[in-house]
Amino acid sequence: MSLARRALAEFAGTAALVAVVVGSGIMAAGLSRDVGVQLLANSLATAAGLAVLIVVFAPISGAHFNPVVSIAAWILTRRDATPAVHGRDLAAYLPAQALGAVAGAALANAMFALPAVEISVHDRSAPHLLLGEVVATAGLIVVIFALMRQGRAALAPVVVGGYIGAAYWFTSSTSFANPAVTLGRAVTDTFAGIAPASVPGFIAAQLAGAALGGLLLVTLYPKAQQPDVKPTPDPVRQAASADLA
């Protein structure tokens, strides 16, 4: 796949993910006054939507949709024979993800007849929320890259979607765990929004969580498991050996 095509996949996938997060939050808030019901609807839609998007976009770009996942992939696999992400990929993925997140939030707003860009006033700067982001992001990094090192990346749609759906409920921050999504959610003053003043703290917490998750991962899985590959027979060498016999 060309780099432009992969960057487009990251843009489109991140936009779709944020549209799911924001749009389901708007729908839930319009259908129920119960915050618990709203969060349940939002988390179920996000978990299911994320799983579908990973299936669709993983063959093209790896379906990161998240700057900390892309950065972690670059750091953790840069010495592998086939790195998951190269430096040039990172330079294309990060802006694509950020722009996609903002576009996705604007799309969700527009679908519900709201201003396309509406700055959020939902303050999320409390220390316990930042701690929740550290935990959520650390867990996400461990989940994703543990699957890779186990050779079970095919389970990512179900496992990653399930983790994010669960983290909505067991973290105080409702598990943004994604700097691009955090940026996108700053331009919607709805159930899923976050005030711009809270964005830097959330992103710092996410970066710290990614670092913590990476350290835990390499402690638990020091090396990626290598598949047991048998050498492919070389018919030319076989024929030459037969002639010499």
Image (tube, rainbow, N blue to C red):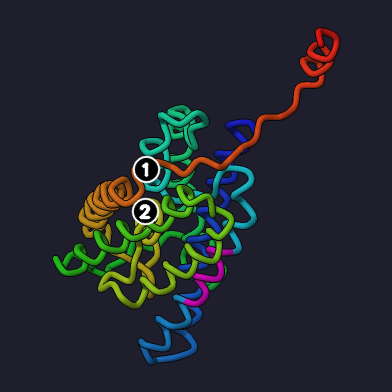
The magenta stretch is 44-51
Instruction: Give the camera-side residue of 145 and 223.
Output: 223
Q: Is residue 176 above or below residue 147?
A: below
Q: Residue at x 16, y 69 (%)?
A: 128
Res. 182 image quadrant: bottom left
Magenta region includes residue 48:
yes
The residue that mark 1 highlights is 72
Amino acid at pointer 2: Ile
Q: Residue at x 37, y 58 (%)?
A: 140
Q: Residue at x 42, y 50 (%)?
A: 145
Magenta region includes residue 171:
no
Asked whether disc 1 touches disc 2, contact meaning CB atoms under 8 Å apart, the reply is yes
**Secondary element at tag 1:** helix
The reply, left or right, for residue 144 in relation to residue 8 is left
* Mark 1 surroundings within 10 Å by alpha-carbon count, few (fewer than 14), some (14 through 19), many (20 or more): many
* Mark 2 surroundings within 10 Å by alpha-carbon count, few (fewer than 14), some (14 through 19), many (20 or more): many
The residue that mark 2 highlights is 141
The outermost residue toward the front is 245
